[in-house]
Amino acid sequence: MTDILTLVFRTLSSQTGQNKDPSAVPPPPAPRSNTLVVGEHRLSRSVLLLAAVTAASELGVRVAFFAQTQIQSLPECLQRCSKITFSYPRTLEELLQQVASLHEFPCPPSLIIIDRLDGFLRGAVASSHVGFHSGDESRAAHLAALLCDTAAFLTEILEKRGSSSAPCRAIASFLSDADSGQESRDPSATDSILDVLDRYFQARCTLDQDRSYEAAAAAAQEAWHVYLSGAKILDDLEDGPTLAQEWKLFIFPEGLMEFKLV
């Protein structure tokens, strides 16, 4: 999945300086890896939508996009794209059922996207309680295992059909308790749900806001660090060219997004 994210970043990269020569950008890594996007909801959803439209328009593959709530004001390019199917399961049980039935599609997707895993995994508790609760670790493992197994099974189906759309990849977004700004959380504690998800997703795309003056200097509204990491990426580096693991994302007032290779 990191190969599609890299394609997104390259497509929206600055055309000045070191990115002017496309050959200078490392080739996409880890074509079979599943990726977890970790960070603020608003930005992670934008990354997922960019991945969906890039996969459909640039690679010509089918995309299954799952979100718990309906996405308002979808860009026109997404509304018109017949290769992207949006589904809105309300509960974890509905999501599990819909993911498990993807193999029944006449044309199985080559990319499975789940927006906001944390929304599906949070315990159904009173509104006065915040965060994850007992049993969420096992639910996280169940969902992640099903997602990865489904991607592997769909890859087999696509390969048997001789489809150029193989392999099938998965990408999901997640907001940890630490990133959600919970003041009661122990800063030294680890996120047990994120630890579970990391066992199943080979790669991670971490979104970290840059609060320095660099955004203002670039006449941008926001600046973010985008880190690609994971065992699959590191494995590919052993015999291949060096891969830049970090990008800088600038978001401008009119909504334009621009990536720069760091």
Image: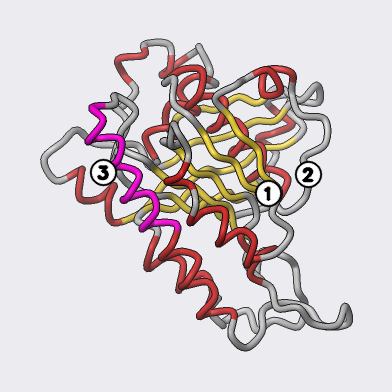
Q: Is residue 262 visible in this depiction of the protein?
A: no
Q: Main secondary structure of the magenta part?
A: helix
The mark that comes first in sequence, 3 or 1, is 1
**Residue type at numbered disc 2:** Gln
- Viewer-nearest residue: 159 or 24: 159
**Residue type at numbered disc 1:** Ala
Residue 66: x and y, percent?
A: 62, 47
Per the image, the residue denoted by label 2 is: 70
Q: Which residues are magenta?
A: 147-162
Q: Identify the residue at the far right of this view.
A: 128
Quadrant of the image containing the N terminus: top left
**Residue type at numbered disc 3:** Glu
Report the Cα–Cα distance between label 2 and label 3: 31 Å
Q: Is residue 209 left or right of residue 30?
A: right
Residue 255: x and y, percent?
A: 76, 25
Determine the residue positioned at 53% across, 33% down. 51
The mark that comes first in sequence, 2 or 3, is 2
Image disc number at residue 156: 3
- 2 and 1 marks in contact (CB < 8 Å): yes
- Viewer-nearest residue: 8 or 154: 154
Per the image, the residue denoted by label 1 is: 67
